[in-house]
Amino acid sequence: MMKLPLLLRISVLSGLLLGGCGYKTLPVAPSAMIPRPVTNLSHELTGNGAVLRWTFPDRTVSGEKLAEIDSFQLYRAEVPADAYCESCPVPFGAPVSVAGGSLPNKGSRQGSYEESPLRPGYIYFFKLRSRSSWLSESEDSNLISFRWEKPSAAPKHNAAVSPAAPADRTPPQVPSNVTAARTALAVKIFWDAGADKDLAGHKIYRRIGEGQPELLGEVKVPYNLFEDKNPPPKGAKVFYSVNSFDQSSPPNESKPSAEASLR
């Protein structure tokens, strides 16, 4: 049996191995797809916990553009505040997998994760790693930490209470020059209104003989005319008066005007 030279045997064996596994070229090393680490991990406290936020890395450690991030591995630790040791290692547990996603052609994509509920009196630590595949994982992100204390409930009335404006108790001016004139079917009552800025209207009263004044009706500004469409018969002693009222609630009402008589 003829023996092949050593160099030739090595060459033939390499060709067989490469051809048998189907590779046309050498596989890309996983390290070439390792994402850059996240550098802006931050947090915002809420009423029951915290929201973590960060920017998706869009380049590999060698500067290649990434099309997507497969996932993030979020590491979390909690330590009682009264047992915290600054020089002790942070006791991170097993990571939580947070979904990644495609990266935009322009701009950046933001990631977020809500952690709740948290325990009062504990210090929390978070960091994360990015994965472009299950083989390619970044280094740790920046580390964040904070102490959690549940926010106290806001007071129901946390704004300064302004003193209430004094209520308007000033009645408008009394109407003047009240006149009553009988027509064929009614009695018309006229008057001059006062100059109050908050004047709302007038009330018309009628008194027959020695009786008490009774309210007939009212009219709103700017009218100063009222018709008594059901007057007493001719010959009866009839007296009309008018009061003013303003826009307050309840309205202020003036004293009665001088009566206008009708015989």
Image: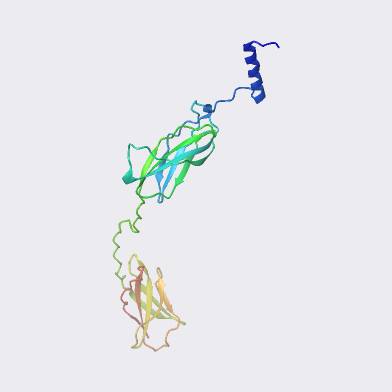
Say which quarter of the image contains residue 78: top left
Check the image and report above or below for 5 versus 200: above
- Residue most toward the right? 1
Asked whether, in this view, residue 36 is left or right of residue 6, the answer is left
Which residue is nearer to you in this view: 33 or 248?
Answer: 33
Point out residue 212 in the picture as x, y percentages from the top left corner: 34, 85
Which residue is nearer to you in this view: 123 or 208?
Answer: 123
Check the image and report above or below for 241 versus 105: below
The colour mode here is rainbow
Which residue is nearer to you in this view: 111 or 252?
Answer: 111
Point out residue 120 in the picture as x, y percentages from the top left corner: 36, 50
Q: Determine the residue positioned at 47% across, 30% down.
A: 36
Point out residue 201 in the picture as x, y percentages from the top left corner: 38, 71
Q: Determine the residue positioned at 38% across, 75% down.
A: 203
Quadrant for the C terminus, please.
bottom left
Point out residue 243 in the picture as x, y percentages from the top left corner: 34, 75
Quadrant for the N terminus, please.
top right
Number of labelled discs? 0
Q: Determine the residue positioned at 50% across, 41% down.
A: 97
